Image (cartoon, rainbow, N blue to C red):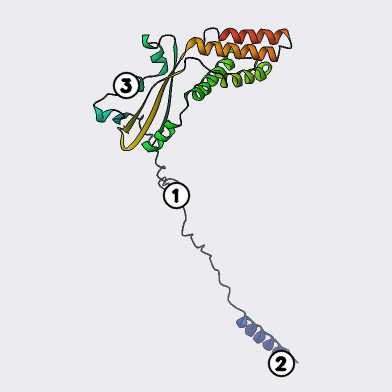
Amino acid sequence: MKKIMFFLLLVLISLSLFVGCLAPATTTVTRIEDEPADKPPPADNPPPADNPPPTETQPPMEDWAIIDHKTKDFGGDVPDWVTSTPMDLESQPAFQGLYVFIIDSTGKDLQGLQLWARGFTAPSEVARMVSTRVEDKFVGAAAGDMDMLETYMEEVVISVSEAQFPGLRTADNFWVKKQNRNNTSQIEYRYLFLVTVPVSSINLAVERSFNQVVDHNPPKSEDEQTAINRVQDAFEGGL
């Protein structure tokens, strides 16, 4: 009996050893993460900043030189009024009692400007410019009351734009060819008209327009009448 028990014990030990040999070995693997190709550098060594976009440098103020003009081939000079402002001219004795208008057009082609000049009509151009001045002055004089006087102003401006100005005269016309000193490839032509109108002629036309509008559309309240009077007073000294 003891022999049988001893034999079974040996068999169990042998089986245990056999199963243990079949079990797989355990291997510890440490995972190494792939480093990205575009891994940023350490914080203490930042990448160089991108170059800022170029800043566009503004060109200097245009400085024109007259290189040709209407009377150059005949030995003539450029008239003073061509390089003056209307305000400058109105202060001169030669233009005393006159409103001065310099009406011009510019372009790359002289022939095109000459066509414009042939179709130029001084009365309509002056009426347009006078109505613009009236509107600007009206707005300034009616500060705070424009809601009340807007329709009144529009009617006055329309009336002035259709007015006739006795004594209107086209005093001269001239053209010049200009070159930008800072950019010699930039060349333009300028055609100008010098127009004068007696101050009394324009002032009477504006006063007549005011009166016609008030007669056609009388003020609806005392406040409206006061506002109208204030605007009319602003035109007592002319445009």
Percent x, y of residue 237: 52, 7
Q: Is residue 10 above or below residue 114?
A: below
**Which is nearer the N-term, disc 3 or disc 2?**
2
Q: Are marks 1 and 2 in contact (CB under 8 Å)?
A: no
Tell me which amino acid carries mark 1: Pro
Q: Which mark is drawn over residue 42?
A: 1
Percent x, y of residue 143: 61, 14
The label nearer to you, 3 versus 1, is 3
Q: Secondary structure at mark 2?
A: helix
Quarter containing the N terminus: bottom right
Few, some or many C-alpha atoms within 10 Å of disc 2 (few <14, some 14-19, many ≥20)? few
Q: Are marks 3 and 2 in contact (CB under 8 Å)?
A: no
Which residue is label 2 attached to? 3
The CA span between labels 3 and 1 is 73 Å
Percent x, y of residue 200: 50, 9
Few, some or many C-alpha atoms within 10 Å of disc 3 (few <14, some 14-19, many ≥20)? few
* Label total for image: 3
Q: Is residue 20 above or below residue 212?
A: below
Question: Who's the residue at 54% across and 21% down the image?
Answer: 132
**Which is nearer the N-term, disc 1 or disc 2?**
2
Q: Which residue occupies the foreground of this view, 54 or 60?
A: 60
Tell me which amino acid carries mark 2: Lys
235 relative position to 107: left or right: right
Which residue is label 3 attached to? 79
Tell me which amino acid carries mark 3: Pro
